[in-house]
Amino acid sequence: MVGCESSGFPKIPPLSVTDAQRAALEGWVRRRTTAQALALRSRIVLECAEGHSIMEVSRRLRVTADTVRTWRRRFLERGLDGLCDDPRPGVPRTITDADVERVIVKTLEETPKNATHWSTRSMAAATPLFIDKVRDVVGLYLDPPEKALVLCVDEKSQIQALDRSQPVLPMMPGVPERRSHDYVRAGTTTLFAALEVATGKVIGSLHRRHRAAEFKKFLAKLDKEVPAGLQVHLILDNYATHTTPDIKKWLLAHPRFHLHFTPTSASWLNLVERWFAELAQKKLKRGVHRSVQALERDIRSWLADWNENPRPFVWTKTADEILDKVTAYCRRISDSGH
């Protein structure tokens, strides 16, 4: 909780930051390319979030109390957007984050005509976090920090080794390839993958099980392969294996690793999913594997070939564009009653 202002000023509302907001603010403070004004505003918010009074923050950062009040109030009113005063390119944005939140909550909480509900109230309650996470992840894509590596991480679990009950008949003039739809299942494997956003290179690891223990081994592999002088920013989902006490303990012992979580049910925000789609379409869909070992050899071979000539997936949409589209979609389904 933040302390009161000095005598003569009324009490002020407490200021708190989410994990996603804190990550963004700390990134702005550390990043060399950040404008000094934005870095200062970020420090003001972080100091206030620690519980320091306005006068304490003023003394610590050597700025006037009015400056602290201004940016504290702007953050309370508009979140991270409130700290940015540079005009946006193109047509000015007319939908605020507060507008996005109201529309999504309304869509999720209110019952549409001729239906039971849109979704759960817990999803509606998570809407502000959705907005913060979109801004955090997209910010890493469009403006990555210096001296750092941004990696998109996920697991493709339950990859099945499938042997078709009949041989695949090859393509002939005027006749398409013919495949049986009956399979003999020979087991499964899980591929842990980290896509380097800047280059498209992928660090991969195969495991027969899909637990926090395997994820911890994969983190150790990343720590070994990423040069020691670089900070490591991981974009990943909130799957249970990513947040166990053992994983949190490992992260505390490796402070150069920073986790950035995608919103619930928003795997499309993680670029490694695009790479998994390439793997599935070009290697797994038509593959015939009589054992898990054969499947894993094929995956390792495809991964090595990919890294010989990696292709980065370039993110182009801004956070504002994404949030505006989400808002428009929610309004459309709300108005239609479907």
Image (cartoon, rainbow, N blue to C red):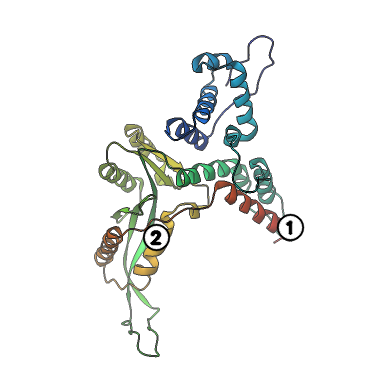
Residue 145 in picture, x, y percent from top left? 41, 39
Residue at 29%, 64% (x, y): give it.
Answer: 302
Residue 323 in picture, x, y percent from top left? 60, 49
Q: Quadrant of the N terminus?
A: top right
Relative depth, front residue between 167 and 12: 12
Residue at 33%, 36% (x, y): give it.
Answer: 250
Q: Which mark, by number, is residue 326?
A: none
Relative depth, front residue between 156 and 303: 303
* Amino acid identity at mark 1: Asp
Residue 334 in picture, x, y percent from top left? 71, 56
* Residue 98 picture quarter: top right
Question: In screen coordinates, is 113 left or right of 280?
Answer: right
- Between the residue at mark 1 and the residue at mark 2, the CA separation in whole angstroms equals 35 Å
Identity of the residue furthest to the top in this view: 7
Q: Name the residue under label 1.
A: 335
Q: In which quarter of the image is the C terminus?
A: bottom right
User: Mark 2 Cα within 10 Å, few/some/many (few <14, many 20+)?
Assistant: some
Q: Name the residue under label 2.
A: 276
Q: What element carries label 2?
A: helix
Question: In screen coordinates, is 22 left or right of 290?
Answer: right
Identity of the residue furthest to the bottom in this view: 174
* Amino acid identity at mark 2: Phe
Residue 246 in picture, x, y percent from top left? 35, 38
Disc 1 or 2, which lies upstream in sequence? 2
User: Mark 1 Cα within 10 Å, few/some/many (few <14, many 20+)?
Assistant: few
Q: Is mark 1 on a helix, strand or loop?
A: helix
Question: In screen coordinates, is 304 left or right of 39?
Answer: left
